Image (tube, grey):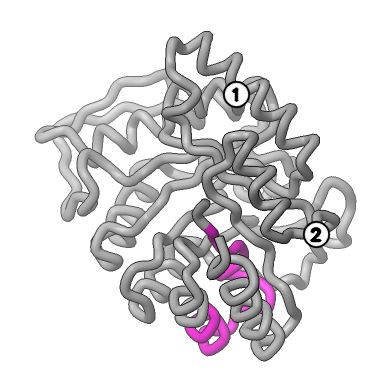
Amino acid sequence: MKFGLFGINNGACASPKCAAAVARAAEDAGFESVWTGEHVILPDPQAPPSPVAPDYPMLDPAVALAFIAAHTTKLRLGTGIIILPQRNPVVLAKELASTDVLSDGRLIFGIGVGYLKPEFEAIGAPFDHKGARAEEWLAAMIALWSMPKPEFSGKWIKFKGVNAMPRPVQKPHPEIVFGGHSKEAFSRAARLAKGWYGFALDLEATAKCVEGLKAACKAARRRFEDLEISVTPSPRVKLDRDTAKRFADLGVSRLILLQRGADQAALLEGVGATGRDLIGKL
């Protein structure tokens, strides 16, 4: 089982001093990766399904991970997730290639399609056809990252006679993970990604998602065992060695844990306790 830490760009970790200290502590404690969340803007006042208050601090994922890269040596750096249909894929390809270069090949590109309509409206991005546009954006980004002479012709984006350097360190491109709990999200993970990321799940919900992923892999003619499953356990889950083993028995190979604490001291204590009481004993 690999262990990641979610939220290296938000809350108390929106402070550079705290983020650097927590990332170094996570690396020392045996965590394999740290992960960012993303909302470019948040509805004000907060209203469902918005996940946090509008004044909750959240740094841009690529910027935050490039900063963390400078303070660590081996932690994988995951976007958990970037809301791809809200982005310009050509610009994002440059930003993430830069992050991969600055981290010497440690980026994991986690993708979501988004669900907050006010966020899309503020950015000026269409709220319809989010999944289809995410798939097209990803294909365009891979073309920029991997083709000797990049060109792409899709429904919404076209380019040729261009190039973008430097390319990512990872070849042919950074590891791709799709998030989401829908049938469509399972299909995108099975068809287009190395892995899938489920957020805030208990064991029962994880088992249901795994069944959906197995069906998606069958439809895509892919072995389920070749899909890397990452899960952030729900805050209601008491995570101990037995529970971690039960997640592993379901096919989960990475647990991305929520921050434990509201300030730097509490976060460092939580990271250390996880390393000592869980990671170090598995």
Q: Secondary structure at mark 2?
A: loop
Q: Residues within 10 Å of mark 1 (few under 14, many from 20)?
A: many
* Residue 170 relative to residue 131: left or right: left
Q: Residue at x 43, y 61 (%)?
A: 77
Q: CA distance from mark 2 to mark 1?
A: 25 Å
Asked whether 180 or 210 is in front, the reply is 210
Q: Nearer the viewer, mark 2 or mark 1?
A: 2
Relative to 145, say whether 139 is above or below: above
Q: Residue at x 54, y 39 (%)?
A: 229
Q: Residue at x 78, y 66 (%)?
A: 54
Asked whether 124 or 69 is in front, the reply is 69
Residue 6 counted in the magenta span: yes
Work out which quarter of the rendered image holds the C terminus and state it.
Answer: bottom right
Q: Specify the label residue 67 is tagged with.
A: none
Residue position for label 1: 213
Q: Is residue 102 visible?
A: yes
- What amino acid is labelled 2 in the image? Lys
Q: Residue 225 in the image: x percent, y percent?
A: 47, 27
Query: What span is in magenta?
Result: 3-22
Q: Specify the label residue 238 is tagged with.
A: 2
Q: Secondary structure at mark 1?
A: helix
Q: Residue 18 in the image: x percent, y percent?
A: 57, 86
- What amino acid is labelled 1 in the image? Leu
Asked whether 169 or 144 is in front, the reply is 169
Q: Residue 94 in the image: x percent, y percent?
A: 30, 52
Residue 60 counted in the magenta span: no
